[in-house]
Every structure is written in structure tokens, then in C-alpha cells.
Image (tube, grey):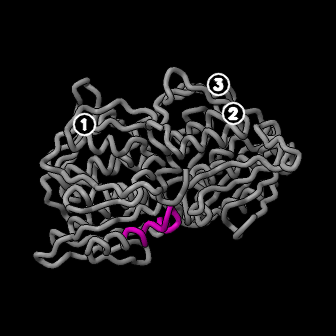
Amino acid sequence: MHDEPTNAPAWAAPRAMGPLNAVVELPGSKSLTARALVLAATAAGPSTLAGVLRARDTDLMIAALTTLGARFEEDSSPTRLRVTPAPIPFPVSRSARPTSEATASAPARIDCGLAGTVMRFIAPLAALADAPVLLDGDKAARSRPLRPLLDTVSALGARVDYLAAPGFLPVLITPGAPDNAVVGAGTGPRDLAIDSTASSQFLSALLLAAPLLPGGARITPTGHVPSLPHAAMTVASLRERGVRVEEPAAGIPEGERTWAVAPGRPAGARITIEPDLSNAGPFLAAALVAGGSVSVPHWPARTTQAGDAWRSLLPRLGGTTRLIRDSNGAPALEAAGTGELAGIDADLSAVGELAPTVAALAVLASAQGRASRLRGIAHLRGHETDRLTAIVAEARRLGAPARETADGIEVGAMTAGARLRPALLHSYADHRMATFAAIIGLVVPGVRLDDVACTSKTLPGFIGLWERMLAGAPPAAPGREAR
């Protein structure tokens, strides 16, 4: 897969021809899948994972962990995996390597694609390998920030060599002394400080590696941590596998909060992964835009996923949400709307990944004379693309008055009688910008998208799911995208 748009013709975003009445069955959470894969690969015993998301990001994670020595086997379905963990130090010296004399000494190469979870979660683990590891990815991945995390990897005793711009991929990580990687060695926890301002994934990466370190670790972010629920998700995933984690007490100021992780490999487990609640956003938003209702089954009663915030965000944007029971008695979240949208002034610092969908609704609300302001999301400039610049560019391409602020975006109200115009929108190889375009296309005729295929990054089969929602067809069982 590539980070540039394909040569395929532009996708014509389908319009909603009337109010919706749909049930959308979604595949597993990307965030939970990534954490489950890492913990299964580093566990003390075998694991079985059900509901695994099989998309580009997670398949790259499986490939990366296989390079580190774990083994993954499909068990009756691509979304159900049996995992044999890797020994530590991770035996990359015995992984599949080049065989020609000219390349036999080359380091093990891990393709990160455009996945922040892969480049960030794998980097600290590479310090626990038995041979050098080269991390690289798509062209756009080479602009995603890594320096604070890799400085901490250096503090663990590894050598970090940047092969291009300092602080970015590609990077060669050469482990330090072998006893660095022995669980249980040493007398106390490692004290690690990290600037996580650019991404909560930095903190999560260290939390996932911490139980494998001699004595565990005490991790202190030196500043603000965006999208903090993702760190809570990591903590919950560790605890689910028997790892002891102490979180900072409420009220401790930023810069002084410390997460303490005890040493000891996670336990093997049988884990069922929740559906992706962030990816539920575009489908639930469709009900607000087109009218009618859309429900997503298997909505968890309690969850650490940021997407659970749709329950409170969508009513602020003009819709309603309620937890219901589907025809099988399973819990589901239903969103309903009339096509009338409200502007919103929202701090999305804890749930930044939801911002592109909220922004799409804000652009459509603009055409109804309502302004919006999204705050606390400066860190989105370092995601798959600079999402703030991308959202503003595409909103303006449609004719909406939008601008960047220091920590977010503002979308002004269009004048009475003004309409959004047809446009060829750009995805920037970013799956959430692609779904931004799909939402707009529900009611704006002539919207096309240059690269809908990038949705395979986290949501395989997006086009089919979207079309079935519009047709009101029964949901298909989630699984691997046809390839």
C-alpha cells in the first residue's frame, strides 16, 4: 500500500435520497486491536484474540511483531487470532532476513506505513531486541513527530540513528546490553520523563513496554497529554492482563503526573475486541445530516474508547442519541436527526480523533447559518496529515468560511441563501479526511473524493458499509476487506 492517491478514478460520494433507517455493524477497534496485539506478542503465554480489526494499520502491526519474534495464526476467521508470544530479547536476528551476501548484514526492517501506533509502539520494543531494527514508512509518515519518544528509547540504553531528518523516520534502533532486556533483573523501576505534547501514543508506547523492563518503570509526561483517554485505554488493557499500574491521583498538575508500572510480562488471555466507536462517527453523523436513524450494535456499556463521546457530542450538533436493544437483545447506540444541524463550541482535546467528523457537521451547519469552533486540537497537526490545515482547505474548497486558530479551527456561518458548492475533495492519504468528504456528499451534490481507498487504513470495506447504510440493507458481518 502507498501513501499517495491511487490512479483510480475519483469516488463520487453518494447522496442520501431520504431519511435513513439503518443498522451498521462495524469491525473491531483499531486502538484496542493495536494494544491487544502488542500485549499478546509480549505476554508470558499464548493468547486468543477475537474481533480483531484486519485493516492496513493492524496488519502492519502484526508484521512488525512477527519480525520481533511473535507468531500469529488465524483461527477459523481472519478476525480471530492465536498468538504465540516472542521470547525476550526479541529474536530479530532470526527473523526473515535478506539472504544475498550483499544484504545479509542489513538490519531487520519494519514497515510502519502511515500508522502512528506501529512507529510509536514498536520503537521502545526495538530497544529490547537482540539486533538492530530499522523503522520506516510511507512518505507522509516521515513527517510524523517521534523525537521525544526516541530520546527516551536512547535513555533505555539503545542507540538511535536518524537516517534522514532528526526526530523522524527512517530511524535505526540498535539495542544496548542484552541484560537490559531481562524481565525481573535490576533493583528498581526506571524513571522516564517524556514530552507527550505531540501525541498520547508516546505515553502509551512506554506504558506497553514498561512491564518488560528490569524493575518496571515510572513514566512522567513533562507537559500536557492530548487524547488522555487513550492512555486510560492502555492502562485498562495492561490491568486486564494482570500488569500492576498506578495512575496519578486526580488533581496533580500536568508535568508532575507519574504512571508507575510494575515489572512482569502480561498474562496470556482470551480477549474480545469492541467495535470501533470512533469509526462509528461518520455513520451516526449521517442520521443527523440526512434525517432518520442509524444504529451501531454491540455498543459497550463501559469503555475507554474516545468514540463513546458521540453519545454527548451528537446531541450538541442537532441530533439525539440513545442506547437501545437490537433485535437480538444486544446493546446498540442509535443516533437520529432531522437534517437540521446546530453549530458547536467544543473542546475536543481528549477526543481529537473525532474532530474531522465533527468538522464535517460544522461545515454543513455553516450552510444553515450556524458557526462552530473546535478547540484543544493543535496536536492534530502531527497526525496522518496536518488535519487542521486539511480540514480548513477542504471546507474552503466547498465554499465554507473556515480558518485555523492556534489550537483548532473556526467555521463561520454562511450568509443567507449561500450554498456549499460541488468540489473534488482531497483525502491527503488520511482515512478520516475521506469520511469527512463522504459526510459532506450526503447532501451536497457533485462531491467527489480523490482517494477513498485510504479508508482501508482502519475501516476495510468502507464503501460497501456506506452504500448499505444508504440503501437500508441488512448489515454484513464484519471481516477482512476483499483484496
Q: Amino acid at mark 1?
A: Val
Q: Quick check: is 390 in the magenta stretch? A: yes
Q: Position of residue 335 (x, y in %)?
A: 22, 46
The reply to whether callout 2 and callout 3 are in contact (CB within 8 Å) is no
Residue 148 in view in this figure: no
Local packing at callout 2 (Cα closer than 10 Å; few below 14, some 14-19, many 20+) is: many
**Which residue is label 2 attached to?**
70
Judge depth for marks 3 and 1 and give the one in front: 1
Residue 128 on image: x %, y %:
77, 45
Q: Position of residue 419 (x, y in %)?
A: 17, 72
Judged left or right of residue 417, residue 203 is right
Report x, y in % for residue 263.
71, 39
Separation (CA) of disc 1 from disc 2: 37 Å
Q: Is residue 343 above or below residue 207?
A: below
Q: Is residue 101 visible?
A: yes
Mark 2 belongs to which amino acid?
Ala
Residue at image position (40%, 71%) is: 408
Q: Earlier in the sequence, mark 1 or mark 2?
A: 1
Q: Nearer the viewer, residue 382 or 400?
A: 400
Tag on residue 23? 1
Main SS of the magenta part reads helix
Q: Residue placed at 78% from the left, 62% from the top?
A: 161
Magenta-drawn segment: 379-391
- Residue beneath disc 3: 46
User: Which numbered disc covers residue 157?
Assistant: none
Of mark 2 and mark 3, the one earlier in the sequence is 3
Badge 2 marks a residue whose secondary structure is loop
Q: Amino acid at mark 3?
A: Pro
Compared with 24, 139 (above or below) is below
Cα separation between marks 2 and 3: 10 Å
* Vertical placement of residue 364 versus 25, above or below: below
Q: Residues within 10 Å of mark 1 (few under 14, many from 20)?
A: many
